[in-house]
Image (cartoon, rainbow, N blue to C red):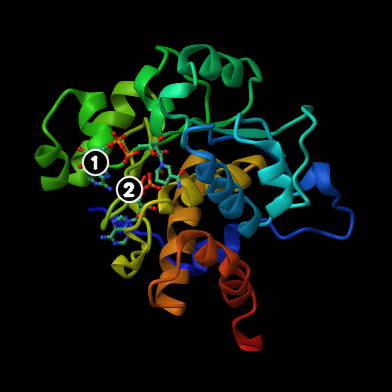
Amino acid sequence: MTGVVTAGEIAAWWPVPGAESHKYTRGVVGIDAGSPQYPGAALLAISGALGAGPGMVRYLGSAPRDLVVGRFPSVVLADGQVQAVVAGSGWGALVDAGPRLREALERRVPLVIDADALRLLPADLPAETLLTPHAGELARLLGVERGEIEADPVAAAVLAAGRFKATVLLKGAVQPVASPDGSVRLALSGPAWTAQAGSGDVLAGACGTLLAAGLPAGRAGLMAASLQALTASRFPGPYPPDVQASRFPEVVWGLLAPDQQ
Ligand SMILES: NC(=O)C1=CN([C@@H]2O[C@H](COP(=O)(O)OP(=O)(O)OC[C@H]3O[C@@H](n4cnc5c(N)ncnc54)[C@H](O)[C@@H]3O)[C@@H](O)[C@H]2O)[C@@H](O)CC1
Ligand SMILES: Nc1ncnc2c1ncn2[C@@H]1O[C@H](COP(=O)(O)OP(=O)(O)O)[C@@H](O)[C@H]1O
């Protein structure tokens, strides 16, 4: 049986800062998303990362830097220590994905591998790697038709996690998170308002923040996907994905302190 994660589990796992916390202990997430071809993907991934409550976001990608700090002044452009990296969203054809992914791997921290970085997975992925394909990307990775993935997303996620020895969050209407040991859980589901260009980039950013906070990849995937779904349930309507991400904190607070809502 495949269990659905509960709101209570998400609240219990949420990384709440303590009195002694500082930005580096809360977790620094490096975002290598976006490019001159897809600059918006950088902003979307950053909006998702910030909405999940990181200690710091470093921008490591190739989108125009003025665009990034003009929109998000808390983002640090200087390279340095990170505890997790999000790689691949919006790289497009202008980023040389092989060297770029190797650079991310050389940091030896947990990774979210999304979108264009999923085209060239190395044989040995680090522990706590989270792959975030949609059905089209997973079909390409497994060399099967997309319909096969959509017919049984849970089986497809389990197959992929075993094959790539990494945790797999398969995006879509039903969102299984499968681990290499064969276990699988479903994220909470939400309305299909989230099915819009850029929601995946937001989700990757949120996953990165939770990995940087030290959560195992499976929990990070379940928490971030559920947070996005819960936000779309609480704030239904055609909000763009970065606006949805800006409401994440209210939803997190609702999980942590339900009686104060
Ligand atoms: N504002 C931006 O800058 C955005 C940039 N994006 C970037 O755009 C590039 C292309 O991404 P795409 O995903 O469109 O293209 P891909 O070429 O990776 O995938 C397209 C194929 O997958 C199928 N597919 C797409 N989404 C699916 C889903 N959720 N379920 C099932 N099948 C699906 C499509 O039917 C198509 O066959 C990536 O680099 C991506 O990160 C997108 O994330 C959208 C927003
Ligand atoms: N039917 C649906 N119901 C709810 N959420 C959905 C549905 N379809 C897709 N999503 C969400 O939309 C996002 C789509 O991601 P993706 O296809 O990678 O988009 P993009 O690359 O354009 O950002 C994911 O976050 C997924 O959770």
Q: Do labels 1 and 2 touch, CB within 8 Å? A: yes
- The residue labelled by disc 1 is 135
7 or 140: which is nearer to us? 140
| Rendering coords of residue 184 (x, y %) | 32, 45
Q: Quadrant of residue 156?
A: top left
Residue at position x 82%, y 47% from top?
23
Q: Quadrant of residue 61?
A: top right
- Horizontal arrangement in the rendering, residue 110 relative to residue 118 (left or right): right
Amino acid, disc 2: Lys
| Rendering coords of residue 130 (x, y %) | 46, 35
Q: Quick one: SS at disc 1?
A: helix
User: What whole-number distance in Å separates the C-alpha atoms at marks 1 and 2?
Assistant: 7 Å
Where residue 23 is drawn, which disc sits there?
Answer: none
Amino acid, disc 1: Ala
Residue at position x 71%, y 60% from top?
16
Asked if disc 1 is less than 8 Å from ligand 1, the answer is yes
**Image-quarter location of ligand 1:** top left
Q: Quick one: SS at disc 2?
A: loop
Report crowding for label 2: few under 14, some 14 to 19, many 20 or more residues within 10 A (C-alpha): many
Is residue 98 placed above or below 205 in the rendered structure? above
Is residue 54 placed above or below 62 in the rendered structure? below
- Horizontal arrangement in the rendering, residue 1 relative to residue 175 (left or right): left
Where residue 171 is drawn, which disc sits there?
Answer: 2
Asked if disc 2 is less than 8 Å from ligand 2, the answer is yes
| Rendering coords of residue 201 (x, y %) | 47, 46
Residue at position x 61%, y 48% from top?
46
181 or 133: which is nearer to us? 133
Evaluate whether residue 163 shows in this view: yes
